[in-house]
Image (cartoon, rainbow, N blue to C red):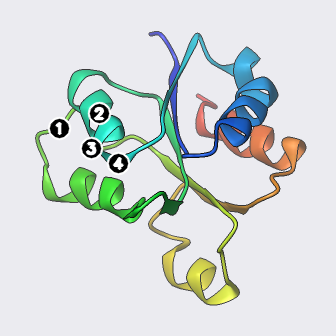
Amino acid sequence: MEKILLIVDDNKDIVDVVQSMVEDLFDRIESASTVESALELLDGEIFSAIILDINLDGRNGAEVVKYLIDNPDNFNQATPVVILSGIITPEFTERYQRRFAGILTKPVNSDELRSLLENLFID
């Protein structure tokens, strides 16, 4: 099965950096810079993993997570979500660590991100 990553971040530089760090782990990488474009992609394709920024331009990335939870028939109900944000606090991590496949802070450490994603796909 094709491994496809979705990166949701409104900063193109972050998308480019993350993509360069993990492009060899996926067959294809898609990106979305808004909540709306992320939801459109999630409606049309099954992703292997999602990397999601919380603080998107004018919107909250948590709306993407809410969509996944509130729409049990969507293609990506079981897709692991990795939060990648510059506004992560220890309280956020403690409160939500069980809800997500991982919670990472910006600037992201390449080894940490790669290890987390590789562990998602161990059979």
Which numbered disc covers residue 35? 4
Residue 5 position (above or below residue 88): above
Q: Determine which residue is flagged by label 3.
A: 77
> Mark 4 vs mark 3: which is more N-terminal?
4
Residue type highlighted by circle 4: Val
Sequence order check, earlier mark of 4 and 1: 4
Amino acid type for the residue under numbered disc 3: Gln
Do labels 1 and 2 touch, CB within 8 Å? yes
Cα–Cα span, label 2 and label 3: 10 Å
Front-lying residue, 48 or 31:
31
Q: Residue at x 50, y 70 (%)?
A: 98
Q: Secondary structure at mark 1?
A: loop
Assess disc 1: are there few (<14), some (14-19) or many (≥20) residues with their C-alpha within 10 Å of its C-alpha. Answer: some
C-beta proximity under 8 Å, tags 1 and 3: yes
Query: At 48% across and 10% down in the image, what residue appears?
Result: 2
Q: Work out whether mark 4 precedes mark 2 in sequence or the reverse, and give the earlier one.
A: 4
In the picture of the structure, the residue carrying the numbered disc 1 is 74
| Quarter containing the N terminus | top left
Question: Dot 3, crowdedness within 10 Å: few (<14), some or many (≥20)?
Answer: some
Of the two numbered discs 2 and 3 in the rendering, the one whose residue sits closer to the viewer: 2
Residue type at mark 1: give it: Asn
